[in-house]
């Protein structure tokens, strides 16, 4: 079972127990009048008096407990806190698994469900576990070396979620050097690298150099045309 799920489940149980203890420590709801038992004890001790309306009262008696309104408000606040955390736990840890199992049950009897090797990575990413998502995508790279998508997703997580542009650049460079890519895939990596050098690293010469390589490697293609257009925008030609 997922360690993070167990930790969050324990936190949820602790919240429920804490809410229950708070409600108990608040005590009973404040009573407006003394009970019959309290009156009997007061009569025996001679502590009863009559008020101006002729009603029997206990001398020095004050209502005990908390008001009903206060207890209701505290109860509502505690329920909202527990329910919100429970919804977060359900959404991040239980819902993806339930959806996956339901899909498998729904289609399993009539047709085979296509296996998605990147399912685990997407689940980790949805939970905010970025390192685990990267590790899952790297596992896909090992089984599908011709697929550029896991490389792209790793670089995206490093750049957008971990805010590490250096790691993102290193990932894209490693991807480029890892195999002979199709033209579209190789051009995609190079354009993304040029963008990172220009925007994140403010290294215009390096960006220009990569775009010039695109023009040289893929002449008379849309990639060459796009690179040439960008070079003009940068004032390089």
Image: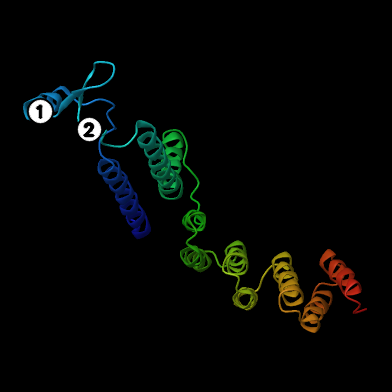
> In front: 211, or 202?
202
Residue at image point 62% right, 69% down: 159
Q: Could you tell me residue 168's position as x and y percent?
A: 62, 73
Total marks shown come to 2
Q: Residues within 10 Å of mark 2 (few under 14, many from 20)?
A: few
Q: Is residue 207 above or below residue 121?
A: below
Q: Check the picture and name the quadrant holding the N terminus.
A: bottom left
Secondary element under disc 1, as helix, strand or loop, is loop
Task: Name the residue nearer the viewer: 218 or 133.
Answer: 133
**SS assignment at label 2:** loop
Q: Tell me residue 102's x, y (percent).
A: 43, 38
Residue at image point 50% right, 46% down? 114
Q: Earlier in the sequence, mark 1 or mark 2?
A: 1
Mark 1 and mark 2: Cα distance apart in space: 13 Å
Residue beneath the point at 48% across and 66% down: 139
Return the residue nearer the eye: 1 or 44.
44
Q: Quadrant of residue 185?
A: bottom right
The residue under label 1 is 46
Rendering quarter of residue 211: bottom right
Q: Position of residue 2 (x, y in %)?
A: 35, 57
Which residue lies at the image location 26% right of the left edge and 45% below the top edge?
21
The residue that disc 2 covers is 61
Q: Decide if residue 64 is on the left or right side of residue 142.
A: left
């Amino acid at each position: 079972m997922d360690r993070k799920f167990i930790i969050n489940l324990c936190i949820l149980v602790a919240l429920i127990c804490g809410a229950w203890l708070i409600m108990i420590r608040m005590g009973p709801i404040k009573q407006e009048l003394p009970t019959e038992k309290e009156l009997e004890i007061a009569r025996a001790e001679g502590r009863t008096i009559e008020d101006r309306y002729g009603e029997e009262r206990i001398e020095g008696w004050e209502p005990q407990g908390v008001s009903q309104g206060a207890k209701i408000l505290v109860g509502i606040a505690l329920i909202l806190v527990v329910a919100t955390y429970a919804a977060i736990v359900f959404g991040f840890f239980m819902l993806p698994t339930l959806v996956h199992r339901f899909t498998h049950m729904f289609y399993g009897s009539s047709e085979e469900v296509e296996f998605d090797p990147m399912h685990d990575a997407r689940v980790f990413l949805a939970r905010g576990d970025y390192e685990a998502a990267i590790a899952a995508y790297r596992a896909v790279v090992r089984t599908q070396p011709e697929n550029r998508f896991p490389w792209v997703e790793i670089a995206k997580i490093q750049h957008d979620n971990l805010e590490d542009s250096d790691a993102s650049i290193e990932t894209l460079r490693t991807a480029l050097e890892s195999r002979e890519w199709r033209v579209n895939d190789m051009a995609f990596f190079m354009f993304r690298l040029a963008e990172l050098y220009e925007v994140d690293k403010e290294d215009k010469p390096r960006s220009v150099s990569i775009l010039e390589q695109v023009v040289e490697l893929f002449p008379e293609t849309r990639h060459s045309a796009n690179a040439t257009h960008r070079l003009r925008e940068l004032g390089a030609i």
